[in-house]
Image (cartoon, rainbow, N blue to C red):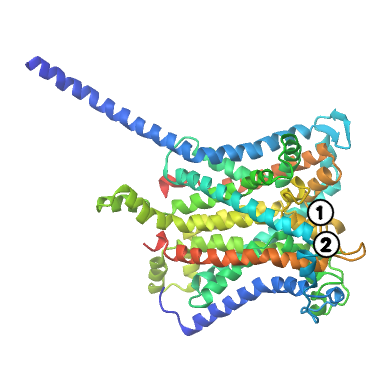
Amino acid sequence: MSTMQTRTAGDVAVTSPASKRARKSDKSRAEARLGWYLAGPAFVILVAVTGYPILQALYESLFSFRLTAPGDREFVGLKNYGVILTDSLWWRALGNTALITVVTVAVELVIGFALAMVMHKVLGWLRPIVRTAILVPYAIITVVSAYAWQYAFGLTTGFMNTLLGLGDYDWFANKWTALAVICLSEIWKTTPFISLLLLAGLAQVPSDMTEAAKVDGATAWERLWRVTLPNMKASIMVALLFRALDAFRIFDNVYIMTNGAAGTETVSSVAYNQTISRLEIGLGSAVSVLLFVCVLLICFVAIKGFKVDLARARGEG
Amino acid sequence: MGAMSTKEKTAWYVGALLIVLYAVIPVAYIVSMSFKSEAALSDKKFFPSDATWANYDEIFAGNGSDLFLPALRNSIITCLIATLIAVVLAMFAAYAIARLDFPGKRLVLTSALAVAVFPVITMVTPLFNLWRQVGLYDTIPGLIIPYLALTLPISIWTMSAFFRGIPWDMEQAAQVDGATSWQAFRKVIVPLAAPGVFTTAIIAFFIAWNDFVFGLSLTSTSRAQPVPAALSSFTGSSYFVQPTGAISAAAVIVTIPVVALALIFQRRIVAGLTNGAVKG
């Protein structure tokens, strides 16, 4: 009797931590399984819809291949990349794209924050009007925005020349003025995207913190920089990153307004012209791969340089 | 929010009016263009001097209607389905990312980012070839699938960023206070999460509605061609006439549902963001 009791006690002493460990790993296994059940479908679609095209593009970029002459398909290794990287058209397109990205994102961040502040602060009957108004440019199709701005500045259709007293100035004949109108359309259309994300961030700033800072005598400027902005850093980073990457792929505005004329090509429009217009699948695929590499570089800088990290935030948030 | 001084209030009101002007002027111009007669389209004035419905006749009953009406139907169907699928899938994924600890979480987020930044143009050629082989070329499902590549990543990122800001402890607190886990979820978590989901739905729908590259490249007829692609293929009544009026009228029509949606969702955003988790 007494030996049995001892043994039982001993067994309990030995098995108890082990079973606790087993329970814990069961729990984390269940959590892992649930995690994949929930995230899995989205993940599979993401990988399938883009994994296949990028692999195909990588493969095609190694061939000299025109759809009009399918028999002449020939493996050329990295020659397509050599052709592109030594062509001034590529560098001009890359320069235009980088310029458009920097200008539009910088302007949009400032205007977008101002819009978000107004949307956040305005009360009463104006509030729904303002919030609906901000959704209008955002919701409008880029192609429609491109036409609106093209017509506004157009040589025969535009009121802007009349308004500015410029007579018959052709905005789309000169590279810089054409790019300026393209940027205007892009900024007008996409600033609300940034301001909506910033507004979501603004709403997450605890109002008692700004109130407390106010009571402590902080000026509006200090409250903005010390309380509001640090508290919405995550929203700012997500907005900034997505807009920069989106701006880098600019296509619609360019296609509608100039279709690359007057030296306004962007990387995407070069890729489109090679692939769809000229049916140069090999060269077009290589441009697409290079565009993808550029975009990865931007991501890398954002994530390493600015510590945009969604995945790690869980434990620390 | 504390009481504002009159001066401060006035400043915000002026800001609000500037926003409305900012949003409305380019739209007003395209509306004005849509009412101009063919002769007035090149008069370089902001307002039409001789308002006419001719351009609307053109796209609803005239030569443009064969192109425009099916495109409008295609856009609506494609975008609604793509948004619904994307938001539901992304909601599950974002919940898992925000709340659960599972291996590969970073992988999901990284691939969402990779897809979000994926150059749309790069997808076009391989999909074009594949879709022709499997019969998805020039069909609505053939557009919905690539649209998921546009709408899913941003839905996942936006929603998981939002879900992380939710004080999930409140769920346990409610359970401690005697609520069942379903009550805790429904009364505490759903009201906190809903604003993020609705904001995401808006973003996803407008992104799908906005697509131009896929519509341009993966469709060829009124079977599946969406409005943006149709707009760029309008032709004038003769070779020498620019289709400016018809494009303007069509642009106005596709803007109307968008403004209507903005009105509906705007309430959700306001309610969501002002009653959100952050005030608790």
Observer-nearest residue: A70 or B4? Answer: A70
The structure residue drawn at horizontal position 52% and vertical position 74%, both measured from the top left corner, is A127
For residue A137, side relative to residue B47 (left or right)? left
Q: How dense is the environment of label 1, judged by Cα within 10 Å: few (below 14), some, or many (20 and up)?
A: many
**Tag 2, which secondary structure?**
loop
Return the residue at label 2: B63
Q: CA distance from mark 1 to mark 2?
A: 33 Å
Q: How dense is the environment of label 2, judged by Cα within 10 Å: few (below 14), some, or many (20 and up)?
A: some
Q: From the top left corner, tell me how far across and down residue B37 is, in percent.
A: 83, 75
Tell me whether marks 1 and 2 sit on the same chain. no
Residue B87 bears which disc, if any?
none
Query: Can you say which quadrant of the picture contains the C terminus of chain B?
Result: bottom left
Q: From the top left corner, tell me how far across and down residue B45 is, in percent.
A: 80, 79
Q: From the top left corner, tell me how far across and down residue A44 is, in percent.
A: 57, 37
Return the residue at label 1: A265
Tag 1: residue type? Glu
Observer-nearest residue: A304 or B37? Answer: B37
Tag 2: residue type? Asn
Q: Farthest front residue?
A: B61
- Marks counted in the figure total 2
